Image (cartoon, rainbow, N blue to C red):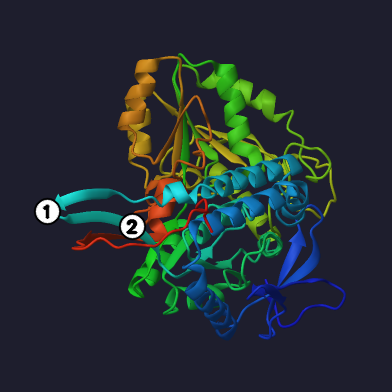
Amino acid sequence: MTTSEAAPGLPLVPHWISGKAYGGSSGRVGEVYDPSTGKLTKHVAFASPLEVDQAVAAASDAFLTWRRSSLSQRSKLLFAFRQITSERVAELAEIVTSEHGKVLDDALGEVNRGLEVIEFACGIPQLLKGSYSENASTNVDVYSIRQPLGPVAIISPFNFPAMVPVWFFPIAIACGNTVVLKPSEKDPSAAIWWAERWAEAGLPPGVFNVVQGDKVAVDRLLEHPDISAVSFVGSTPIARYVYESSTRHAKRVQALGGAKNHMVVLPDADLDTAADAAVNAGFGSAGERCMAVSVLVAVEPIADALILKIRERMARVRVGDGRRGVDMGPLVTKRHLEKVASYLDTGVEEGAELVVDGRKIVPDGDPGGFWLGPSLFDKVTPDMSLYNHEIFGPVLSVVRVASYKAALGLINSNPYGNGTAIFTNDGGAARRFQNEVEVGMVGINVPIPVPVSYYSFGGWKGSLFGDSHAHGTEGVHFFTRGKVVTSRWLDPSHGGINLGFPQNT
C-alpha cells in the first residue's frame, strides 16, 4: 500500500546508495505491517526514477574500480562478510519474522541457507578459472577467461526477504559486478541489513546498493541502459513481464516464476513418512514458498489412509505469533490473506471436499493478525481453481489417480515445472520418475528439493524465463561473459631479479 507521506513516529526503511542510507526525496512511501498483530510498524521509502538513476550511477562508477579488483581481494572480503553475517543470524531472523510473519526457526533456516551461497561465492578464484591449451598451433596458445558484466539488478520477492537476494548478489559481486537490489516493499528491512553488513566488511561504496519501491522502481531498472542483467524471483505473470521487458532492452535476464508443486505418493510408500512430509512441505511458512507442496497426488488405493494421517498431524499444528515457539505464523498481508481464504469458498463451490477449514483455527497471537490455519481439500480435479492457480498459502489439495502413469501425466501436462517429489520404496519407480518427469527440481522421498548452493536452483516451463538457474555454476556463468584469447609471442621477456617469496595481493 502506498501513501503520500510517512506518519509521524514510525521508522522509515531507507534506500542504500553509494555506501550509506538515504531516506529518499520522492515523497512516496509504502506501509510495512507486523503480520502477527496486523499493526502498521514502519514506512518504506519508494524510489522515483531519478533515485533509481542515482543508485545505478553509483553502481556504474564503482564498477570501474571493482571489476579490476583481484580475485584474492574479493575472496578475502567475502570471507569477512560471511564471518560478520554468521555471527548475527538471529538478528536477521528476527527482522524477517517481524515483517514477513514466518516463525523464528523458519527464518533462521532461511538465513542459514543464504549463508551457504555466500560460502560458495568465497571460492570464486576456483569458480572463475578458465582453460588453457598450449601450442594449439605452432607457438600459438589459446585460453578462455570469464569477465564481469557491469551493474546488475536483483528484484526479490516477499516470501524469502533474506535468502533469495543472497542467491544472486554474493556471486554477482564475487564475479566483479556491482549490484542494485530492489526488495519487496512488504518486508524491506532485510535488504538494508545486508547492506550494512557489506559496509562493515569493507565493501567499497557503490558496489552494493538498495532501492526500495514498487513498479515505478522495477520498470526503471528494467529499462535503464546501464543495467547489464536482471535477476528476478516472483509470480509467473510478473516473471514473464520482467523477462520480456528486460530482453526488449537488450539485457541478460533470469526470471524465476511461480509453481504448482506435486508430491506423488505411490502405494508402496511409508504413509507416516509421506504424511509428515505433506504437512511440513505444505504448511511451512504458511505455504508462502515457491517450493511448497500444494498438490498431493495419491495413487490409489492409499488416499483415504493417507488423508487420515495428514488430518491427525494438521490437528497438532500450532498457529500463532512466530516469536512464541509455534509451528506456523500468519500470512504476510491482510490483502494476501483475503485472497488465499477466498479459494476455500471457491473450492467448495467447484465441487472439492473441504476436509479441514483453516479459517476455524484459534491462533496463539493478536486477534488482528493475518491468520489462516492449514487447510485440506480432497477430490480436487485438474479443472478446478484450487489446482490451476498458484494459491501461495496453507492450502493442500489431494488429487486421486489410479496409476503411476496417470500421476506422471498430470505433472507433465501442468504449465509449471518448478519442483516435484515422489514417495516410494521402489528404486526402479523413483529412477523412472526422475528421468520422465518434466520438472526442474526433483525430490525422491524429499518433499522440498531445494538444491545445495553449489548446484543451481530453477524450474522448467512456466516456472523459468531465461536459460540460467540461480546460484551454483549456472549463477557464475550468468554473471560473467566468456572470452577466448588466441596468443602468440615471438620473443621471451626477462622480468629481472626478485628473491622474495611471491604473494597474492
**Residue 62 % position (x, y):** 54, 74
Asked whether residue 280 is in view, the answer is yes
User: Which residue shows up at 41% across the image and 15% down it?
Assistant: 426
> What number of labels is visible?
2
User: Which residue shows up at 60% across the image and 70% down it?
Assistant: 209
**Residue 289 % position (x, y):** 57, 46
The residue that disc 1 covers is: 138
Query: On the picture, is 313 further left or further right than 229?
Result: right
- Image quadrant where one finds the N terminus: bottom right
Which labelled disc corresponds to residue 145? 2
**Residue 6 % position (x, y):** 78, 78
**Residue 99 % position (x, y):** 73, 57
Q: Residues within 10 Å of mark 2 (few under 14, many from 20)?
A: some
Q: Earlier in the sequence, mark 1 or mark 2?
A: 1
Asked whether residue 463 is in view, the answer is no
The local secondary structure at tag 1 comes to loop
